[in-house]
């Protein structure tokens, strides 16, 4: 597939992207199917409510992601934890180290971003 990224280190995946399934909001499926790196997924299916798992519901991670007025707030972090925020097309929005357990990024309302916390990555819809 032409123009699909080959370096998946940002996402820390052990499975090749073309063998993986991506669940995306149904109204954005065409965008995901045409935008890098998402179009490289072998299968792209609509996200349904049954699939939703909140980061708040994963206590083993010890972190929480919240959105507020176009901002992404990551909390529950150890001070100094590296955090970065990217657009879905891979553009860096910002990097920070957690201070007092939190990191905040301006992402813009009604956007989808990727938040990378240490070696974990999360897709977040910003309200």
Image: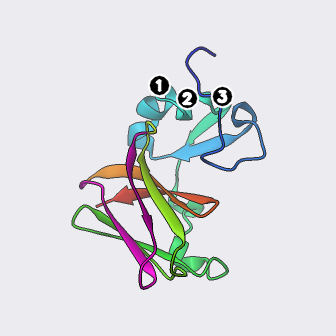
Residue range in magenta is: 91-109
Residue, disc 1: 34
User: Which residue is more in the foreground, 58 or 116?
Assistant: 116
Nearer the observer, disc 1 or disc 3?
Answer: 3
Q: Mark 3 or mark 1, which is nearer the start of the sequence?
A: 3
Secondary structure at numbered mark 2? helix
User: Which residue is more in the foreground, 96 or 45?
Assistant: 96
Residue, disc 3: 6
User: Pointer 1 and pointer 2: residues touching (CB < 8 Å)?
Assistant: yes
Find residue 54 and report its horizontal and vertical position in percent.
52, 70
Inspect the magenta stretch and tell me whether residue 99 lies in it. Answer: yes
Find residue 72 and report its horizontal and vertical position in percent.
35, 65
Find residue 127 and report its horizontal and vertical position in percent.
28, 61
Residue, disc 2: 39
Find residue 30 and report its horizontal and vertical position in percent.
43, 29
Residue drawn 62% across the image and 48% down it: 11
The 10 Å Cα crowd at callout 3, few under 14, some 14 to 19, many 20 or more, is few
Secondary structure at numbered mark 1? helix
User: Which residue is more in the foreground, 14 or 118?
Assistant: 118
Residue drawn 50% across the image and 83% down it: 76
User: What's the distance in space between the residues labelled 1 and 3, CA to CA?
Assistant: 16 Å
Image quarter of residue 107? bottom left
Figure label count? 3
Secondary structure at numbered mark 3? loop
Q: Mark 2 or mark 1, which is nearer the start of the sequence?
A: 1
């Amino acid at each position: 597939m032409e123009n699909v990224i080959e370096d998946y280190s940002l996402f820390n995946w052990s499975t090749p992207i073309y063998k993986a399934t991506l669940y995306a909001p149904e109204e954005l499926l065409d965008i995901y199917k045409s935008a890098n790196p998402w179009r490289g997924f072998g299968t792209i299916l609509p996200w349904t409510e049954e699939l939703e798992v909140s980061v708040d519901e994963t206590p083993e991670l010890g972190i929480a992601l919240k959105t507020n007025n176009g901002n992404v707030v990551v909390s529950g972090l150890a001070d100094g934890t590296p955090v970065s925020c990217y657009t879905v097309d891979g553009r860096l929005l910002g990097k920070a180290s957690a201070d007092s357990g939190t990191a905040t990024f301006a992402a813009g309302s009604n956007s989808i971003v990727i938040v990378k916390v240490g070696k974990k990555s999360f897709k977040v819809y910003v309200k």
